[in-house]
Amino acid sequence: MKSDGDLIQTQVGIVGAGLVGMAAAVAMHHAGYKVALVDAKQPEPPARAYINTHKDAWDQKIYAISPKNVQWLSKLGIWQHIDPLRIGRVQAMQIWGDAGGSPLVLDADDAYQDHLAYIVEGASLNEALVRQIQTCNISTLLGSPGVKLLTEAGKTLLHLNDMALECDLLIAADGSNSWVRRQMNVALNKKNYDHIAIVANFDTEKPHGNIARQWFAHDEEGNNTILAWLPLPGNRISIVWSVATEYAHTLMTLEDDVFTQQVSQAGGHLLGQLTQITARASFPLALQISETLALDGVVFIGDAAHQIHPLSGQGMNLGFRDVIDLLAILQDKNSYQSINDPGLLKRYSRVRKADIFDMRLLTDGLFQLFKSDRLAIKSLRNLGFSITDHSTIKKRLVEKAISL
């Protein structure tokens, strides 16, 4: 990296030091690019520091990572920094429709695989990424909010409070309320679900058997609900409960023992007595897709590019695939092409739009399908569960899940 006074010059600038932004920084570094990682905020003391001191503590925010992305993170030297005793493994999924009855079962064995996904705490993954950023000696400009963004003469100039960063390619990984996206006047297609996701962790009386469980149901007012129980190491689970906003406010005000009873009842008491071991957290849910994924030497990744319903557990995987596809395109470029070549970035947009469309179709489609209370739709969706419960179809579903 070259510095000329208060001007810092590099090949790749990354705005946003979240999980996807840090992964992009490490991946770009491994590909041989000079990288600078910028974030408006100073890093907060990691939740992991508390967890290291209190071994029974668990981060309430968790992510499902596909086997393919675990391999990618391992190649980057990131996954190895995570304590294997803090990683949950999903060997099968059980999914219930709102008609009750037996669940649809998707098993890794159906595709001759060991696992469908790995469950990792946000704090553990964050710590692993920070350690690899430090190991790679990647330049970081933290606590440096953007002031102005200019793109001209094949370069992007990012003005910060007391300096400026000039780069060939700028990667916007600054979240769903992306400052870079606003500076570039990129429109956002957004649909609010009027749902809130509630997350918390529990000890369970019975072993979960490394099975992820999901229920599509309705609350007392007829609003659709989606509850997921995700296996953590030992007799522990993490839940993600998507419910209508008003119901969410009610659930968030309940005493812990009453809320725990609600969670257990919604899951048919399958794992016996539950004990809440973390505080609850909640966040609003929306579908939002950036109309443009690349523009004038700037590319958008992660939540800055797309945000989907968490029912598929693919949000983080989608962000990692942004980085993987971008690197694959850059590594396949001709020697005369710059890394901000418009043709390359258009290709990135085409590839990512197809993947995002598929995931949007899955998540939004399922949400809308179970939102409807029309009898014909209800019959259709439960017929779909019956049709899907076929060995050949299940095998293809499992293969698709683990290939993401």
Image: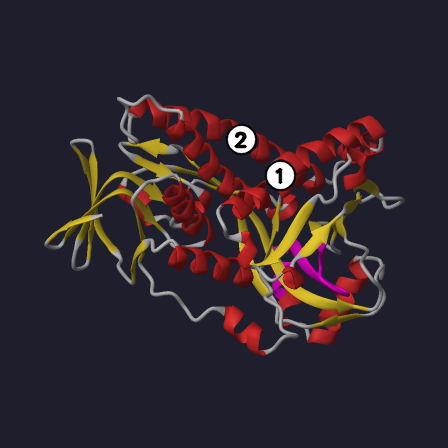
Q: Which of marks 1 and 2 is nearer the N terminus?
A: 2
Q: How far apart are marks 1 and 2 (CA)?
A: 12 Å
Q: How many labels does the image show?
A: 2
**Residue at (74% x, 40% y) in the render:** 373
Instruction: Give 147 or 111, whichever is nearer the viewer.
Output: 111
**Residue at (80% x, 39% y) in the render:** 109
When asked about the image quadrant of residue 270, the answer is bottom right
User: Viewer-nearest of labels 1 and 2?
Assistant: 2
Residue 241 drawn in magenta: yes
Outermost residue toward the bottom in this view: 53
Instruction: From this view, report whether residue 141 is shown above or below residue 360.
Output: below
When asked about the image quadrant of residue 243, the answer is bottom right
In the figure, is residue 347 to the left or right of 357? left
Dot label at residue 355: 2
Residue 128: give x, y in percent of width and height: 50, 59
The answer to whether any part of residue 207 appears in the image is yes
Mark 1 neighbour class, 10 Å CA radius: few under 14, some 14 to 19, many 20 or more: some
Please provide the residue range marked out in magenta.
229-249
Instruction: Give 5 or 77, whichever is nearer the viewer.
Output: 77
Q: Is the magenta stretch mostly helix, strand or loop?
A: strand
Residue 91: give x, y in percent of width and height: 76, 47
Residue 176 drawn in magenta: no
